[in-house]
Image: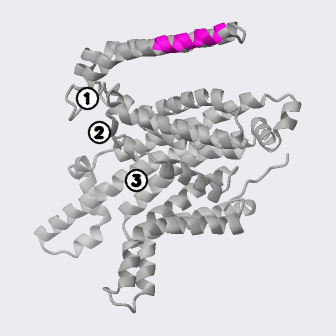
Amino acid sequence: MRKNLDIISAYSIMLGLIILVGFLQSWSMALSILCLCLISAVMTMGANIQWGYAGLINFGIMGYTALGGLAAVLVSVPPVREAWQVGGFNMILCAFLIAFMVFSIRFIMKNYNQSKKRSYGIAAIIIVGLILLRLISAPAIESIESVSPATTGFLGGMGLPILFSWIVGAFFAGALAYIIGKIALGLRADYLAIATLLISEIVIAVIKHEDWLARGVKNVIGLKRPVPYEVDLQSKEWFINLVEKFNQGTLNLITNTLERQEALKQLVIESSTVFVKLCFAGLFTVVVIILLIVTQKALYSPWGRMMRAIRDNEEAANAMGKNVVKQHLLIFVLGSAIVGIAGAMMVTYDGLFTPGSYRPMRYTFLIWVMVIVGGSGNNFGAILGGFAVWFLWVEAAPIALFLINFFTSSLEETNAFRVHLVNSIPYFRFLMMGIGLLLIMRYRPKGILPEKIKHI
């Protein structure tokens, strides 16, 4: 217990802050922060596996998050039958053609030595394949996107429960990571960071502009939830009775029957939002706990010790017969798959897929700040970083407003300086994030909860 006192203290403080938000602002806001903190924690665990375990710099987190979100659409949205009728066969044919091109190129590279003929053959396959893809897909895409573009204009999905998309998102992200890893993992650390960032931008660009896939920037809304809807809860007798029981003391103070009914109705509306977010928080907590148990077991297993040895000294590990490239690829795929799960969780919670919202600041660099602040190489630290940084990111504006009002209370409300500070509140989150990161780097360079090595 004593050796884990720092973890218990840090998490207790974080939980206390979220509860404080519930009392000072609203429980709906507190649970919203908690849900997004849990999703951020999943992302930080994925990034921590790559950086903390193996020392791999991956600036493509945004791309894997978007693929997880895309999986939520392709799994949960019902298929658009009219779109499949006018262009579905052609798109399936294009998928087979891409697979044939990949296997053909792989066959040539494995069975023929480096030569001009091999290079010309690969180039011919790519050029002819791209021409055929264009000829087959262009009319199909045009037909698909013209089917009720205001509401659909895409092929739709499989119409399955959205929870399945969390697994599919992991497969999507893992598959892309495998391809990127095969190409880019041999690069130097800084080149790898640039390559992963650019590839993630390519992924976002494709999702934005290929309307037939997921409506592009038109967005997909109304995704089905794995938890009840607020409107449905508000009409359920068991829920109304539950709310009435929890608020019995408050309702008993109201003597007028009509006013009591109105007060109960308002409490039911507010409680339905809290209940739904509580359900989401429960689901996300289960995912975080499962991932934490698995990653902790992996960290202190022989495989985890081998990965840290590779991270600390690749040459020595290679000299001892460890396949560094293979292990790097494995951990790159695993970390990216976890980020894909987080991307699907995010879209599940929001209920909509908005490709235009995927930006490096939010879905790459902020995640890296979380890992650095929490403590890379420590799963508990990565989760804490996700909580702490996201909490500060959300609460920066209310904190800044409180501080401005406190320090300028002697000034008139129309004072130019005070008005300027109030208008600058949206930018205070960047100031606070910068100051916080500087303080952590100065006084806790290894993070709030630094990596702990167990000597066995």
Amino acid type assigned to the residue bearing label 1 in the image: Gly
Any mark on residue 278, and which? 3
Highlighted range, magenta: 117-129
The residue at the point 65 percent across, 50 percent down is 379
Q: Is residue 127 magenta?
A: yes
The residue at the point 52 percent across, 50 percent down is 40
* Circle 1 SS class: loop
Measured along the vertical axis of the image, is residue 149 above or below residue 291?
A: above
Amino acid type assigned to the residue bearing label 2 in the image: Lys
The 10 Å Cα crowd at callout 1, few under 14, some 14 to 19, many 20 or more, is many
**CB contact under 8 Å: marks 2 and 1:** yes
Measured along the vertical axis of the image, is residue 308 above or below residue 37?
A: above
Q: Nearer the viewer, mark 3 or mark 1?
A: 1
The quadrant where residue 283 appears = top left
Q: In the image, is 72 to the left or to the right of 261?
A: right
Q: Is residue 16 visible?
A: no
Task: State which quarter of the image contains the C terminus.
Answer: top right
* Circle 3 SS class: helix
Report which residue position mark 1 lands on: 153
